[in-house]
């Protein structure tokens, strides 16, 4: 727990964990859960622990920000990677209409923004491929007989 003594968000997380807070319970007036605090503090190890404990990785606080937004704002590529690998919704918008990608750009973290852009593009391609597979109609082909053909009088030719 001594690693958690570096900033106020982390100090809040330490108190929550020591008190046995639920991973999805909003602990403060801003409705930031422990997973928000871990992502916002760039603490990938605690974020992973929260996710393994069943934290809602898309839970939004009073600002409409999910943990992905928090990680993008602090430029934590490691936390972003964990959240994306856990299927976080990358297209969630906060109350200002910003995605995590938007926040990464505006906060000066281009490597995080490019990562999220790449993930979004990959998800779009995958979604389009799935959509086109779902809309394909199988073509029914007529069976062909190779080897013998019936004559008009009912006898087979070889």
Image: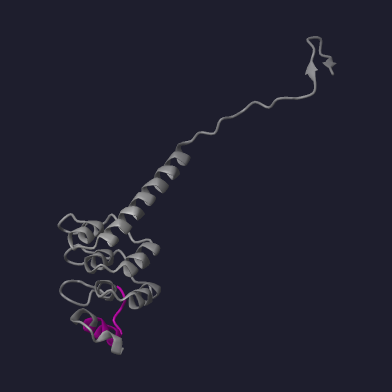
Q: Is residue 56 visible in this depiction of the protein?
A: no
Residue 30 sits inside the magenta stretch: no
Q: Quadrant of the N terminus?
A: bottom left
Q: Nearer the viewer, residue 136 or 155?
A: 136
Going by the image, does 156 lie left or right of 107?
Answer: right
Q: Position of residue 65 (x, y in %)?
A: 21, 64
Q: Quadrant of residue 145?
A: top right
52 sits to left or right of 106: right
Q: Residue at x 24, y 67 (%)?
A: 70
Q: Between residue 100 and residue 61, name the one nearer to us.
A: 100
Query: x, y percentage for residue 121?
Result: 35, 49
Identify the coloring. Answer: one colour
Q: Is residue 136 above or below residue 62?
A: above
**Foreground: 42 or 23?**
42
Instruction: Give left or right: position of 131 versus 75.
Output: right
| Tag count | 0
Which quadrant: the C terminus?
Answer: top right
In the displayed orientation, state which residue is furthest to the top. Answer: 153
Q: Quadrant of residue 131?
A: top left
What range is drawn magenta here? Answer: 11-24
x and y, in percent, of residue 95 in the image: 16, 58
* Residue drawn at x 32%, y 65% as measured from the top left: 80
* Residue sitting at x 27%, y 76%: 34
Q: Nearer the viewer, residue 114 or 96?
A: 114
Q: Main secondary structure of the magenta part?
A: helix
Q: Position of residue 87 (x, y in %)?
A: 38, 61
Residue 69 sits in quarter? bottom left
Q: Is residue 119 visible?
A: yes
């Amino acid at each position: 727990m001594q690693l958690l003594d570096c900033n106020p968000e982390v100090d809040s997380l330490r108190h929550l964990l020591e008190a046995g807070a639920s991973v999805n319970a909003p602990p403060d007036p801003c409705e930031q859960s422990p997973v928000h605090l871990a992502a916002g503090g760039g603490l990938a190890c605690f974020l992973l622990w929260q996710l393994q404990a069943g934290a809602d990785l898309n839970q939004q606080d009073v600002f409409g920000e999910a943990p992905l937004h928090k990680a993008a704002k602090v430029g934590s590529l490691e936390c972003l990677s964990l959240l994306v690998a856990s299927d976080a919704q990358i297209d969630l918008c906060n109350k200002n209409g910003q995605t995590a990608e938007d926040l990464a750009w505006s906060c000066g973290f281009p490597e995080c923004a490019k990562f999220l852009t790449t993930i979004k593009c990959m998800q779009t391609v995958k979604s389009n491929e799935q959509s086109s597979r779902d809309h394909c109609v199988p073509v029914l082909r007529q069976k062909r007989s190779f080897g013998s053909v019936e004559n008009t009088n009912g006898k087979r030719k070889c």
